[in-house]
Image: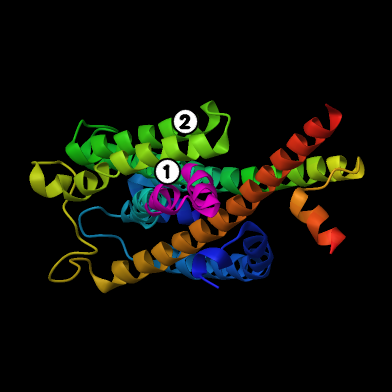
Amino acid sequence: MTLINLANPSRVLALSARILPWLTAATVLAFAVGGVQAYFAPDDYQQGATVKIMFIHVPAAWLGIFCWMLMSVAALGTLVWRHPLADVAAKAAAPIGAAFTLMCLLTGALWGRPMWGAYWVWDARLTSVLVLFLMYLAVIALWRTIEDPTRAARAAAVFTLVGAINIPIIKFSVDWWNTLHQGASVFRVGGSTIHPSILIPLIAMLAAFTLLFLTLHLAAMRNEILRRRLRTMLTVQAAAAT
Amino acid sequence: MTMVTSLGPYAAFILAAYAAAIVIIAGLVTWVMLDRRHLIRLIAEIEAQGVTRRSERRHEEK
């Protein structure tokens, strides 16, 4: 039996029912650890206490980008293998990615006002993240506009793969253009430039947010499988009535 | 109060950022839970009318 055959909706429902409670517990625990570390982290010598905003802003930014990459892999699954679970994974991920990108924009604005003197500037990094948020809204609209899930999945997959070009633009915008947003400081060649007293809480919060994303995505995938079951049952009911 | 004063002059921005994050996360969790409850209720209603999926019928026939 191939991996693709193993990944059928009924098996995923059964397996995820067993995994989800453990994943939820791990998420709560990770937030407890990350939250305590973030609370006791020292102020930054330049940013002062506003560095605490970074403990939610950076993970939210990471998840906004990661979610689109996950949707791009799922889009390949839709277009190449036409696997229904790839459609389910992509559709379930879009609202979660949009929410984390919105969180990134809001927390960034609330950090920018005291540090830069402005909530918003049309900087390449900020603008490309705003474009990412608008792309999430567009892909959600696409899923909702096309009634047939298979056709909607293909249209959303093409849009997702075309939109994936924005991911390297977000990542390298701070290198390609002269931006107000700082350059990479966590994951960079030559190691992080952040002091361990701030880097460790940041990594703890990155882990907690990633676990939260995985939990929410798995739960949303289960819902999407149920929605497709409901659709099938309604079709059977309508066929029986005619 | 001690926590707020320890956050310095920008406490309002820091607390607003955390509040926004909490509201968004709570919104996501509520959306997932309510959606699941709604779908399970609808499926139960249709099943009560004797409608099953084709795969379930095949399973019952075996």
User: Which numbered tag is attached to residue A103?
Assistant: 1
* Residue B19: x %, y % from top left: 50, 44
Specify few, some or many for label 1: CA neighbours under 10 Å numbering under 14, 14-19, or 20 or more.
many
Specify few, some or many for label 2: CA neighbours under 10 Å numbering under 14, 14-19, or 20 or more.
some
* Residue A228: x %, y % from top left: 66, 44
The chain under label 2 reads A
- Indicate whether residue A74 is drawn in magenta: yes
Residue at x 36% of width, y 36% of height = A159
> To which residue does mark 2 refer?
A142
Count of marks overlaid on the render? 2
Name above or below for residue A66 compared with residue A21: above
Which sits in the foreground, A118 or B12?
Answer: A118
Q: Which residues are magenta?
A: A73-94
* Residue A62: x %, y % from top left: 35, 54
Name the secondary structure under disc 1: helix
Name above or below for residue A9 compared with residue A90: below
Residue at x 48% of width, y 47% of height = A90
Would you say A191 lies left or right of A112 here? left
Q: Quadrant of residue A14?
A: bottom right
Look at the magenta stretch and give its main secondary structure: helix
* Residue A154: x %, y % from top left: 44, 39
Question: Which tag is nearer the camera, tag 2 or tag 1?
Answer: 2
Q: Quadrant of residue B27?
A: top right
Residue at x 42% of width, y 30% of height = A138
Identified by mark 2, the residue type is Leu
Name above or below for residue A177 compared with residue A201: above
User: In what quadrant of the picture does the C terminus of chain A appear?
Assistant: top right
